[in-house]
Amino acid sequence: MNAFKPLVFSGVQPTGNLHLGNYLGAIRKFVALQEDNDCIYCVVDMHAITAQLVHSDLKAQTRSIAAAFIASGIDPVKHIVFNQSAVPQHAELAWVFNCVARIGWMERMTQFKDKSGKNAEQVSLGLLAYPSLMAADILVYRATHVPVGDDQKQHLELARDIAQKFNIDFSDHIRKAGLGLDITVGDEPVHAYFPMVEPLIGGPAPRVMSLKDGTKKMSKSDPSDLSRINLMDDVDAISKKIKKAKTDPDALPSEVEGLKGRPEADNLVGIYAALSDKTKADVLSEFGGQQFSAFKPALVELAVNVLAPVNNEMRRLLDDPTHIDAILKQGGERAGAIAEKTMNEVRDIIGFLR
């Protein structure tokens, strides 16, 4: 049982346009979580330079993510919305965690293997140490819960490993400093400063696939813009992309079982289900037996009804970047106050003079 004060943390990288998969898989969940939790939502702009150092306009991309948060319904007054680089304690704790973590742990990370490929010696040190910074993002606030998708579960496990090793290595120091809580790790009593962060799964996350290939995830890096619906797409673009989405010649089945082996049909039905907060079975009970020529217009209407308000509000916010900057600045100050308290205590635990 987690005895630390419950707190939710999550972050989104400002790289490329946010798309429907990001919205359904992450941002809409962030909005729901704020109803019953204290939440900190971060635009992780420091992470954005790990794989690509130079960006054409990182500031604009950062504002766009913040605008998406707010336009989707995240409340930056009741909760905290900020950009990572505004709080230097993230980097300071990441250095401590670099000294806690083992190189072998980092080299086993699936994302590092995928992104480095055969050129592991040529990628940046930042890409290797990325999970250590991710752990610091969470633990500098001593957050207890993180909403995660399948691709982040391994990083969250590493954050737990880092927290556990820090707690065990400094257990006596933590106790002497009068900090932390008594917890049990395995059968071992430990005086812990950092919580063992838990994943927030919150039901099956919709897996949104490419509109051009139902076997691949919708991605902002796909060279074809027709493969995804961007949050900044207007009504005409949304309509065009759904109408051009790849399908097969058969009618929609009446049962979910009938979607097997039909990845494009499964994807479009799944998108409709997610946008309407229904199950795939519900959707097929309504549209089963119909051709895509009838289903696609209904999907267009639904997607426009859900996404147009978000799109319009994002555009309004981005027309006034000083307003977004003010929100991020205020959020950074609030986040920084929490992070500095943590770092003051970490400095005392380690033994840094200050």
Image (cartoon, rainbow, N blue to C red):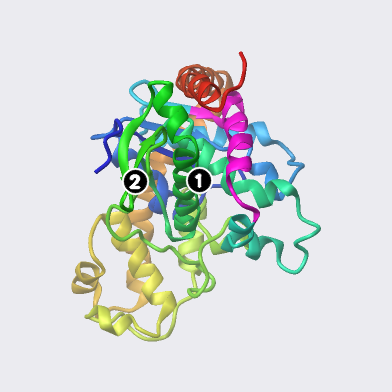
Q: In x, y percent, where is residue 147?
A: 38, 47
Instruction: Name the residue tied to disc 2.
Output: 29
Give the side of residue 65 with respect to residue 15, left or right: left
Mark pair 2, 1: CA separation: 26 Å
Specify the amino acid type for callout 2. Lys
Magenta-tinted stretch = 82-103
Count of numbered labels shown in the rendering: 2
For mark 1, give the secondary structure. helix
Front residue of 102/277: it is 102
Q: Quadrant of the C terminus?
A: top right
For mark 2, give the secondary structure. helix
Q: Quadrant of residue 224?
A: bottom right
Q: Is residue 28 above or below residue 153?
A: above
Give the side of residue 99 with respect to residue 293, left or right: right
Q: Mark 2 near mark 1, Cβ–Cβ under 8 Å?
A: no
Query: Which of the marked residues, 2 or 1, is nearer the chain's N terminus?
Result: 2
Q: Quadrant of the N terminus?
A: top left
Give the side of residue 81 with respect to residue 124, left or right: left
Specify the amino acid type for callout 1. Ile
Q: In x, y percent, where is residue 141?
A: 44, 30
Q: In x, y percent, where is residue 214?
A: 48, 73
Near mark 1 (Cα within 10 A), the count class, few <14, some 14-19 or many ≥20, is: many
Q: Residue at x 42, y 56 (%)?
A: 149
Q: Residue at x 49, y 69 (%)?
A: 245
On residue 162, the disc is 1
Q: Is residue 70 above or below residue 2?
A: above
